[in-house]
Amino acid sequence: MIKTLQENFQKIQKFALLGGIVAIYLVAVGMVETFAQRNLIGTSLSLGHAFLVLGPIGVGILIAQAMKESETKSIYVAGFLAGALSSVSLILFNIVIQIFVIQADPDAVFYLRNMFVSFTPTAFEFLTFGQGMVLGNILLFLFFGLMGMLGVSFLRFPDKIRRGWINSLIWVLAVGLFSENVAQILRELFGPGLGKIIFSNKSMNPVAAIILFAVVFAFSYFGLKKEASDKWAAMPEEKQKKGRVFIIIMAILFVAILPWLVGLFLSQALFIIGMYVMMGLGLNIVVGYAGLLDLGYVAFFAFGAYTMGILTTTGALGRSDLNFWMALPFAMLIGVLWGLLLGFPVLRMRGDYLAIVTLGFGEIIRILALSNWLAPFGGGAQGILHIPQPEFFGLSMNSPQAMYYLVVLGAVLAAFVTIRLRDSRLGRQWMAMREDEDVAEAMGINLIQTKLLAFSIGAAFSALAGAIFAARLGNIFPHSFNILISINALALIIVGGLGSIPGVVVGAIILIGLPEMLREFAEYRLLMYGMLLIIMMIVKPDGFMPEARRSQELRDEKDTLPKQAAGTEG
Amino acid sequence: MLKQFLDRFSWVDFFMRLLQVAAVIVIIVGIFNSLGATKYTSGQWVTLVFAGLAQGSIYALIALGYTLVYGILLMINFAHGDVYMAGAFTAVFLANSLAASGFLGAQPVISVLLLILLAASVSMVLNVVVERVAYRPLRGAPRLVPLITAIGASFTIEYTFRGLYGAEFQSYPIIPALDGQFLTLAGFEIPWTQIVVLVAAILLMVSLYFFIERTKIGKAMRAVSEDKEVARLMGIDVDKTIMITFAVGGALAGAAGVFNGIFRPQGVFFFMGFIPGIKAFTAAVLGGIGNIPGAMVGGLFLGVFEAIGPNLILEGLGIPAVNQLRDAFAFTILVLILIFRPQGIFGERLAEKKA
Amino acid sequence: MGVILKTKNVTKRFGGLIAVDKFEIDVQENSISSVIGPNGAGKTTFFNCITGFYKPTEGKIIFDGHYIQGLTTDRITNLGISRTYQNIRLFSKMTAIENILVGQHPHLKTFWFEAIIKNKRFLKEEEDALQEAIRLLSFVGLSGLGDQVAHNLPYGAQRRLEIARALASKPKLLLLDEPTAGMNPNESRDLMNFIRRLRDELEITILLIEHDMKVVMGISEEIWVMDFGQKIAEGTPLEIQRNPRVIEAYLGRGAASGLNLEAKGVEA
């Protein structure tokens, strides 16, 4: 065993260094400390811990991968060693804080905390488990070693146990993370009793956590999920069809009652998710189908919002007394119009220049909206106030729930149009253009028309989202329409999978929903987006829900496809 | 004949030409009205021009990073503005400590050199890391892919530094030796800070030019930008050369961060790189992207244009509070240049074969 | 039989370089003819001038009674010229069927809004297009591979698919840019037969660029030889084989016998 370790010592060192860098990075940017405020289980295990151990667990996984051939015992030892060594960076960090922060004079010429805001005594306290300099660091060292072994266990546990082990951990952490929301749903469904048993202090009870762990573990271990799917596959065609209809109805029902389950606060989050789904679908046409990287997408959102604002406000800037429903088509029309106007000059432009020019457009429009020059129209920095909420047969839709339905309706409409267009000639034109512009043109495709259609349809969806946004908030300011909105939309369609409609929904839930639900995430949201964009492009460029290709030649004979294909090839 | 003409008539070209003519008319009318109104004295114009030159020299230094990278990898390093921020944001703390200890007052030259050294190192290391982590694994991928990772890198850097140094605005200390000092030139008073920044930037640019033209590494860089495969066959380590290119670009951006602090002390924070980044990219395109002297001239040109343009053109059109529109004006230049003259003012077009 | 494609004085300059120099050809309707020449002679550039990828610096191109020089690529395609590429350029992430459907673009007439409401006209057109695509797929011998993503197909199948895509626009003139590049002799022979079938069954005029002398000599009715952008010879395969200027251009002075031998091999 010693020999195996010696042979692999370079790897161990390398991975430990990597893990150490990850760990200290997460601490130094303050993620760990901020996330420590959200407890997962009881009051001792927080989200901060989960982030803190990302480094050593990752190291363990890497070790297990790199030493696949070695015997299990020595891999665990190697995992422990690498994990523990990766704590060295944090031990140094602790020493630095001890000397330059805790014992230093805050009024000195150079006081470390003035520069590094996250180098706090609280972080020190957290990292040393409150046990002081010596014992705390030793504990940290051992703890990281154990975490390294945990990482190894994800790959080296016997297969059957392994799946249960990972699933249970994920479930417990997820439920713990969303304690407040799960508790809220349980309260709506079963009254206040059950929630109180499982959750306390906005986190999960340790006992409940253990029970959940055991339940999920049992499910995975006995392969209940697989059994169910086997049963499903064995069912006759007709029954499957019925089952599918049932599932769809349940899904619709679920979406319909969702805002009443999750309460006011989360309904607002759902509203925002829906809005981003709409925008994502529009941007997906432009970027995912037509392959035109548009970084100024927020402009159309702004045009939609401002049109709605100007047309319906009861304030001084109002130019008409249309109501929401009458103004909505105008908002979309203006969006389309600007989609054409801004699309026109960039028709001949190459991909990367296109991105910069559209970015420029977005910024120009924001700056103009802020300026005194256009203030008589858009209110300048003061924005537009007093935008009335829509009415529905005389009822004011002033609750987040009502607006949620509106936005779901809009998103469904956008998805419907997207799917229909994708499966038509126009959709094929877009994709052909995305693959190879010159050849597409040589197929007789008019690039100008095709590009302008992509820009204007994408703009229409965005403007629709903007108009609803304006009506929901009641007032709009130029600051709401910055580049970050474009980046949010871009990130969500990339994470979901360019060109994939379910991908847009999933992307919006992950990237928009999570930060809305977890306040702690909000601060680091763009940091995580940025990293996600890089990681996705390197590891999973097709996204989590890749665009699926349709079978057209052999529409009803899915099962025979491989055989036939093999037959004709030879 | 008419049919042949109509067959070849392109609405896009027609509207683009129209747009071009409209832009020229707007500019001419604006200039005519502004100069006719004689609102500003020639002294004020000179002040604006010199402020523009100093600002432009900072754009030029950042633009060099864009141009170097584009020349070699044909990609826009979208994160470059944030690399500039990293240097400026890190050095501000050292600057404040130096000021508090009195060293800045006693030894301004050494202090500034120290600041430049720190900022340049931080930006250099960061740019190299970005290349290694975000771009190198994707070399040879479709063109949009590295652009997307570059956008990702940009936001990662911004919010990493927000996490490290906090979200508050910092400002550089005033250098006592330069504070309120003016150089009188042909009757016009020009602040010394601007002169120092301009001269230092030009010195850096000239040394870069000689570095590229005369040294072995510079030759390797040029070879790699001509043809990576051939360069590899000639025994040049392409990866290393690309790394050095990023390092040089990063160092220049870091230095620009300190110059910016001398010239305009306020407003140092994590998002400060975004707008100068886009403007520097404009400068790089203006000079013909991939063209090193072009980036320098493009930067200076953009700085001056941005400084006098709003007053010279927009004010003449009767637009109030033109200073709010300075950035919009610069972006408009960017858009117009990318649309009408993507090969830049010097006309070096990067060959783009169609079939 | 009339002339379907006529080029007059076609010249393309890139800066100082003259890639195509006053090149003139007359392609007879329903014929198979070839443009040959050494590497870098300007053949593909000439093709690009015909299909509108490049705008010729000078000269006229008359196709089926239309002056087409300087028109955009899509309009030339709509007039009835279709092409394949030297280095296969399929829409690599789309399926084979989708590639062919894109090729049918000039014949599809529904407006995009009809796709949203899915009216009868749209459904019928899509169904017809799909059937036509499946028919074309089997015509080029790729039945059953229609749902494969193009870049997963084997090399030979990709070549065939590219031809199917070009045929989908129902062209009057098909330009094939080195269709046998990278094929072994058997595959090349198959392809020759296939090209003849195209002409005979679909009555399409075919213009080739080709390197493989066996293919060119075996299939063409008329040949133009290009060297440094200029036309150095024209005529039937037999005339071309005996033309000393052609042999010189290909093999240099004094190497005439080599090409003859190779050509005889075909006839044998």
Image (cartoon, rainbow, N blue to C red):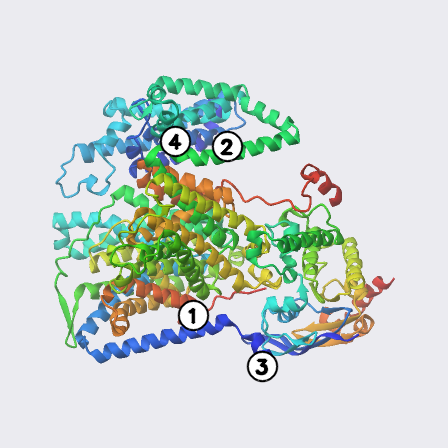
Secondary structure found at label 2 = helix
Q: Quadrant of the C terminus of chain C?
A: bottom right
Q: Nearer the viewer, residue C118 or C109?
A: C118
Q: Which residue is mark 1?
A: B340
Query: To which residue does mark 2 refer?
Result: A250
Cβ atoms at labels 1 and 4 below 8 Å apart? no
Residue C182 in view in this figure: no
Q: Nearer the viewer, residue C105 or B217?
A: C105
**Crowding near pointer 3: few (<14 within 10 Å), some, many (20+)?**
few
Q: Amino acid at mark 1?
A: Phe
Judging from the image, mark 2 belongs to the subunit labelled A
Q: Specify whether C130 is left or right of B349.
A: right
Is the Cβ of the residue at disc 2 closer than 8 Å to that at disc 1?
A: no
**In front: mark 2 or mark 1?**
2
The kind of residue on which mark 2 rests is: Met
The residue indicated by pointer 3 is: B2
Disc 4 is attached to a residue of which chain?
A: A
Which chain is indicated by disc 1?
Answer: B
Q: Nearer the viewer, mark 3 or mark 4?
A: 4
User: x%, y% of residue A242?
Assistant: 60, 31
User: Are dots 3 and 1 on a single chain?
Assistant: yes
SS assignment at label 3:
helix
Q: Distance from label 4 to label 2 (Cα)?
A: 15 Å
**Residue under label 4:** A261
Q: Quadrant of residue C139?
A: bottom right
Q: Nearer the viewer, mark 3 or mark 1?
A: 3
Relative to residue B20, is residue A500 drawn left or right?
right
Cα distance in 3D space between marks 3 and 2: 64 Å
The three-letter amino acid code for the residue at tag 3 is Leu
